[in-house]
Amino acid sequence: MPDLITVREYAYISVAYVGCPESTIDHAYISESAFEYLCDLSASFSKNGAKIFELAGRRKLRLDQYVGVIETKCGTRIEILPKHISQTVDESIDSLVEKERELLKKMLRVSLHLPYRDVGEASLSRFKQPIHEWVIEQFLYHFEILIQHGLRFDYQRVQEEQKYLKGQLQHVKYMRQPPAKKHIFPIEHDVYEVNRPENRLIKTALDLICKKTSSPKNWKLAQELRLMTGEIPKSQNIAQDFKQWQSGRLLALYTDIKPWTELILSEYMPVSTQGSWRGMSLLFPMEKLFEHYVAYHLRRELKDWQVSTQVSNQHICLYGDNPIFRLRPDIYIQHKQTKRKIVLDTKWKLLDQTNRAGRFGLKDSDIQQMFAYSHYYLEHSSEVILVYPYQLNKFDNEISLKFNVDSGEAILRVVPFNVEKPENLINSCISSGTVCL
């Protein structure tokens, strides 16, 4: 069974040594082979412009804003959780980890449009396993339903030689055969079988689960499903089979299991890794998860507003007559009746509104970026909004700033967004055409 280390964003990971302290959620100690694998992984990511780790010494790494699970070649699994909750005095580490895990599940369901089985609070409280086991559990649940309703079969065209006629005789081939083979018939016919791209991919994911899961419950169910689907071959070309995955009324149940199959087989990484090692690795950038999460709840709650993401119809410069340096705000909303426009940008960072001397932790580049959005998208006629995670007693009230321009509407609002109760904060602050998150 693989070793499991649970840490949070920006935690340190060091090589274990004799007498080293016990691992915590903010500083973990792993074997030298696992550490070397992470260093190699970091180097391969850096070549493609993705920053997953940062060297903090010869034998120490610092994690960045990526969450999920990494499995090393030696079997060590590192679970990386979001860091947005401060531990209270009377709260245990296990309770804190469970809160962060539940938050990550919510954000993944929204961002990846995952069909999720709502098992109720009682079952959730019993499921105290890493995030990859939750993904495996959801895959097995949907596969079991698929088996109960019946797998889809498909006609496959087969060309073979037989001593009897079946289907269509290939006349040209038959006429060219030597006299000694006149009793052999080259034929072509269709076979109704379970070998189709969707089933091959699901079987491949199931085989991987049987090797990777550490949960006895998941392993038992995976083995039972494996016995039921022994006639299905594994996929020989995963990318090609995903391209051939069909949809439609007859394949409705396959729609629910597809994203879970993609998660397991694609091994969500920010960039492709080199080599043939295939571990149970799932990495997601928290900035993007937070952006999708905020946009999802805005669409759900603001019925009178059109919510768009990654709008990019404005540029900050011209080179001759050609616009360059595109401005791309995270979220752009417009009221359907009044046409009032507001630009929002999400930042996954913890602010401290009591730190006025340190400008609350806001970065110059973020403020300058919001000024450009205000000028080019809104002509300073409406507010721009920076959205940061809510923190009790640290950042639980809006910070209102005014840009130094003549227009009185050039307002920058920095607002807290409660990721655990997003609907409450949105519903309580919508009034007179102004959106407050």
Image: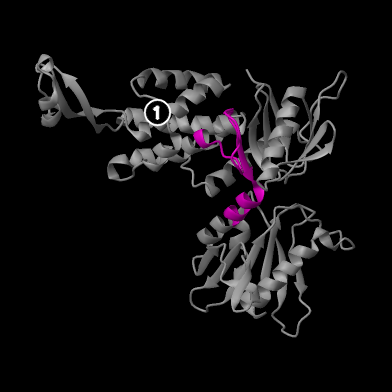
Answer whether residue 286 is magenta in the image: yes
Q: Where is residue 29 in the image (x, y as percent from the top left)?
A: 79, 27
**Badge 1 amino acid:** Glu
Nearer to me, 224 or 100: 224
Q: Could you tell me which residue is drawn at 83 percent across and 30 percent down?
A: 59
Q: What stretch is highlighted in magenta?
A: 265-294
Q: Could you tell me which residue is drawn at 41 percent across and 31 percent down?
A: 202
Q: Where is residue 144 in the image (x, y as percent from the top left)?
A: 39, 28
Q: Could you tell me which residue is drawn at 72 percent across and 84 percent down?
A: 407
Q: Farthest residue toward the bottom?
A: 406
352 to the left or right of 182 = right
Camera sees residue 433: no
Which element type, helix, strand or loop, lies under badge 1? Answer: helix
78 to the left or right of 213 = right
| Quadrant that contains the C terminus | bottom right
Establish if 173 lies above or below 325.
above
Nearer to me, 314 or 401: 314
The residue that mark 1 highlights is: 144
Q: Farthest residue toward the right?
A: 357
Q: Position of residue 44 (x, y in %)?
A: 67, 38
Camera sees residue 235: yes
187 to the left or right of 218 = left
Q: Where is residue 396 in the image (x, y as percent from the top left)?
A: 74, 57
Quadrant in the rendering for residue 72? top right
| Quadrant that contains the N terminus | top right
Nearer to me, 95 or 31: 31
Answer whether residue 338 is magenta in the image: no
Nearer to me, 327 or 146: 327
Establish if 149 lies above or below 382.
above
Q: Could you tell me which residue is drawn at 31 percent across and 30 percent down?
A: 151
